[in-house]
Image (spheres, rainbow, N blue to C red):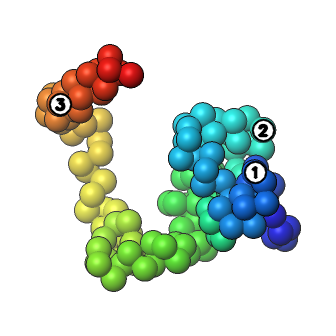
Amino acid sequence: MTDLIGWPQGPRGRGLLGDLFLGNVPELRRDALGFMRHARAAYGDVFRLRLGPRDVLVVAEPAAAREVLVDQAAHFRKGRGIQKMREFLGDGLLTAEGQTWRTHRRLMQPAFHRAALCDMAAAIGEACDPLLAHLEVATLMA
C-alpha cells in the first residue's frame, strides 16, 4: 500500500492482486465483521482500508466519529462515491454537505431521540421478523 502522508496504517490486501487491485475487498466479502474487528484490534480506532484502488479512512471510536461527522464536519468532505450518489439520491442527509447537511440533520434529529426510538421498537421488531425467520431456515439448511 502506498504510504499516504498523515494517514494511519491499516491491513494490506493479500497477494499481488489484493495488494495492487482489490485491496481488502476479498476479506470484507468473506467476513466483514470479523475483518473489521481484527483491523480495529490491530490498528486502533482509526485505520485505513483499501477498497479496490481507493484508500478509505475508518473511524471506529464513537467520540472520534462524532468529532468527524458533527463537531468538525466543515473540515471534512464526503468521498467520491458519496458525491457520485448525489446524482441519483439528491441532496439528502447522506450526500449533503455544509449548511444543507446541517439543516437536514436538525430536521431528522428528533426522530432519533430515545422516546421516539422506543416508540418505533415494536415496528422495527416486526419488520425484522421475516428476515430472522429466513436466516433461521438458511442456518438449518447449511
Q: Residue shown at 63%/45% (left/top)?
A: 27
- Judge left or right: residue 93 versus residue 120: right
Residue 130: quadrant of the picture: top left
Give the residue number, with chain letter if any, for mark 2: 42
Tell me how far mark 3 sits from mark 2, CA to CA: 36 Å
Question: Which element type, helix, strand or loop, lies under badge 3?
Answer: helix
Say if 35 sits above or below 70 in the image.
above
Q: Position of residue 132 (x, y in %)?
A: 26, 26
Give the residue number, with chain letter if any, for mark 1: 14
Tell me, yes or no, whether the two marked residues, 3 and 2, touch with CB atoms within 8 Å. Answer: no
- Name the amino acid type tagged 3: Pro
Q: Earlier in the sequence, mark 1 or mark 2?
A: 1
Tell me how far mark 1 sits from mark 3, CA to CA: 37 Å
- Judge left or right: residue 127 versus residue 37: left
Closer to us: mark 1 or mark 3? 1
Q: Which of marks 1 and 3 is nearer the N terminus?
A: 1
Residue lying farthest bottom? 87
Tell me how far mark 1 sits from mark 2, CA to CA: 16 Å
Give the residue number, with chain letter if any, for mark 3: 130
Q: Which of marks 3 and 2 is nearer the N terminus?
A: 2
- Judge left or right: residue 109 versus residue 11: left
**Residue 110 versus residue 142: which sits nearer the camera?**
142
Q: Residue shown at 79%/60% (left/top)?
A: 16
Residue 119: quadrant of the picture: top left
Q: Where is residue 64 in the image (x, y as percent from the top left)?
A: 63, 50
Question: Which element type, helix, strand or loop, lies under badge 1?
Answer: loop
